[in-house]
Image (tube, rainbow, N blue to C red):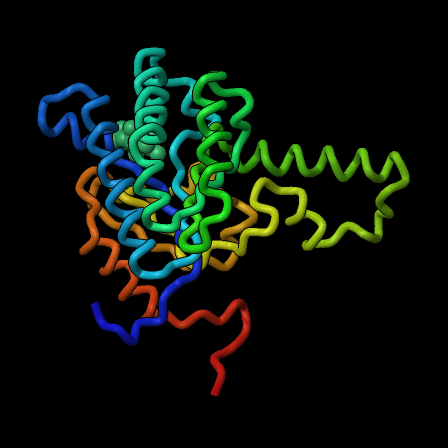
Amino acid sequence: MDKNLKLPAHIAIIMDGNGRWAKKRNMPRVFGHKQGAKSVRSITTACAELGLKYLTLYAFSTENWKRPKQEVGFLMDLLSDFLDKETKTLMKNNVRLMTIGEIDKMDPKVHKKLISVKKQTSKNTGLTLILALNYGSKRELTLAMRAIAAGVLGKKIKVSDIDEELISKGLFTAGIPDPDLLIRTSGEMRISNFLLWQIAYSEIYVTDVLWPDFGKNDLFRALEEFSARERRYGGIQAK
Ligand code: FPP
């Protein structure tokens, strides 16, 4: 990869296509998730090595509970396994783990592990890996609106205090800069209730590559395209 590329500080990824990857091989869907977890490892390491600041991965949405119980259980076990096995690597690579979403409503054992790994890695200063778990953007905005409404009723917030900054502070992503680049794998042209507020000016990159096949070289391709894009944020090109 060209050393002079303009890199994003924050990449967010909708990791899609695990099921199709398995189906193509006549394997059960969960086999695709298992392979997908390997991509999570390699892409996290690649982002840490590149010196990126934030990587947000959409690992489990508020809608994913609708999947068969067995698939949901498998995904939870996979996450639990990831936390057990990867903490050492996260420490070695100076990666800090954070989460967005209502993790307190997940399996208590998984919740406990998440809290523990977040605490263990909290002083790491390299990449911040943010796992979106039991995350839905509409739910996030709803909770923020409720908190603001309660603040207004309790006379802690004036209606005129409500601005973009206050709303951003009420989201799970408070304090985290918005993604510069949003990647979606497997060719679907959808946002799927992911970071609706935060991606207002993100560059979007969709690839046909299925998530279990998404490797370092696919990431570099996305970064090359990002670097070539011109971001105007609604303005005009600087002369
Ligand atoms: C989408 O593929 C993927 C998910 C809903 C789950 C993402 C989970 C992983 C990548 C593995 C585990 C994660 C961690 C953090 C260890 P899909 O099942 O919707 O695929 P399809 O659209 O082809 O059916």
Q: Is residue 89 above or below residue 6?
A: above
Q: Dividing the picture into quarters, in which one does residue 234 lie?
A: bottom right
Residue 55, horizontal then vertical, whole percent: 40, 49
Residue at the image position 36 percent from the left and 66 percent from the top: 7
Residue 237 vs residue 216, the one in the foreground = 216
**Horizontally, is 183 left or right of 136 in the view?**
left
User: Quick check: 138 above or below 23?
Assistant: below
Q: Residue 88: x, y in percent?
A: 32, 38
User: Which quarter of the figure is the N terminus placed in?
Assistant: bottom left
Q: Is residue 81 left or right of residue 121?
A: left
Residue under the image location 50 percent in, 48 percent down: 123
Which residue shows up at 21% across the image and 40% down it? Answer: 210
Q: Residue furthest bottom?
A: 239
**Residue 193 shows in the view:** no
Residue furthest top in the image: 69
Camera-side residue: 239 or 55? 55
Q: Position of residue 30 (x, y in %)?
A: 23, 22
* Residue in front for this viewpoint, 75 or 164: 75
Is 25 placed above or below 52 here? above
Left or right placement of residue 53 versus residue 82 in this view: right
Residue nearer the viewer, 175 or 144: 175
Question: What residue lies at 19% left-to-right and 24% top-to-bottom?
Answer: 31
Instruction: State which quadrant residue 6 falls in.
Output: bottom left
Q: Where in the figure is residue 57, as x and y percent of width and height?
A: 39, 41
> Vertically, is 118 above or below 161?
above
The reply to whether residue 35 is in sight is: yes
Residue furthest to the right = 155
Q: Residue furthest left?
A: 25
Ligand 1 shows up in the quarter that is top left
